[in-house]
Amino acid sequence: MSDEADITALLKKWREGGSSDELFSVVFENLRRIAASQFRGENAAHTLQPTAVVNEAFMKLMGQRVDFKDRSHFFALAAQAMRRILVDHARQKRAQKRVAPELHEEPSIDGIDVDVIALDGALVKLAALDEAQAKVVELKYFAGLTNEEVADVMSVSLATVKRHWQTARAFLFRELEKT
């Protein structure tokens, strides 16, 4: 059975009242890879670790008892959960410091340091203009999916994903320069 079929079957089993333990053991490495991609190039002293992001995101998803349609739907919602966790963490750090966050605490897009709170605000603005473009950013940036995986999750062509990413990235850089 393929990875996609395994995960979809386990989601169905969980939805019907099964344990989330088996599901977690199967999706953990994928989620850990996604979270780790957010921390590449970060300071080793970063106060939030990929495993903590994975554990918290998984617990939130399972606590909501979402009716996951399939593997793609699960990972799309996991990306949203990870985004919320990273944004909330950045807000807490900022509140504790009462000053602008240090750049090494922030992730990057194309090698440019990004304030995750500013990115979240820019994504909200982008979603109001074009929800599909915002979804592409969320899946690529917060879930670490490739263009091909994003196309699969969103059920669009690879060319559409590339076009949305290019336009969204330009919009985000303009918005982030204002902050």
Image (tube, rainbow, N blue to C red):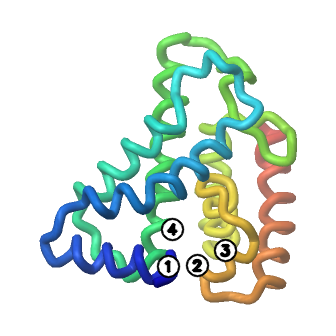
Distance Cα–Cα, label 4 vs label 1: 14 Å
Q: Position of residue 31 (x, y in %)?
A: 51, 54
Q: Residues at badges 3 and 1 in contact (C-beta under 8 Å)?
A: no
Counting residues from the start of the chain, the first of labels 3 and 1 encountered is 1
Q: Which amino acid, mark 2?
A: Val
List the residue tagged with mark 4. 76
Q: Relative to 72, does residue 47 appear above or below in the rendering?
A: above
Q: Is residue 59 left or right of residue 51?
A: left
Residue at which label 3 appears: 149
Q: Which label's residue is closer to the chain start, 4 or 2? A: 4
With 3 as the anchor, is 122 left or right in this view?
A: right
Q: Earlier in the sequence, mark 4 or mark 1?
A: 1
> Which amino acid type is marked by label 3?
Glu
Q: Choose mark 3 or mark 1, whichever is in front.
A: 1
Identify the residue under disc 1: 4
**Comparing labels 4 and 1, the label whose residue is closer to the camera:** 1
Q: Residue flagged by tag 1: what amino acid is it?
A: Glu
- State if disc 2 and disc 4 touch (CB < 8 Å): yes
Using the image, determine if residue 61 lies above or below residue 157: above
Q: Nearer the viewer's eye, disc 1 or disc 2?
A: 1
Q: For the residues labelled 1 and 2, say whether their Cβ atoms are less than 8 Å apart.
A: no
Q: CA distance from mark 1 to mark 2?
A: 12 Å
Q: Return the mark for residue 153.
A: 2
Residue 142, image x and y in percent? 61, 53
**Which residue is rendered at x = 28% and y = 69% of the image?**
66
Query: Which amino acid is tagged 4?
Result: Ala
Label 4 sits on a secondary structure element that is: helix
Q: Residues at badges 2 and 3 in contact (C-beta under 8 Å)?
A: yes
SS at badge 1: helix
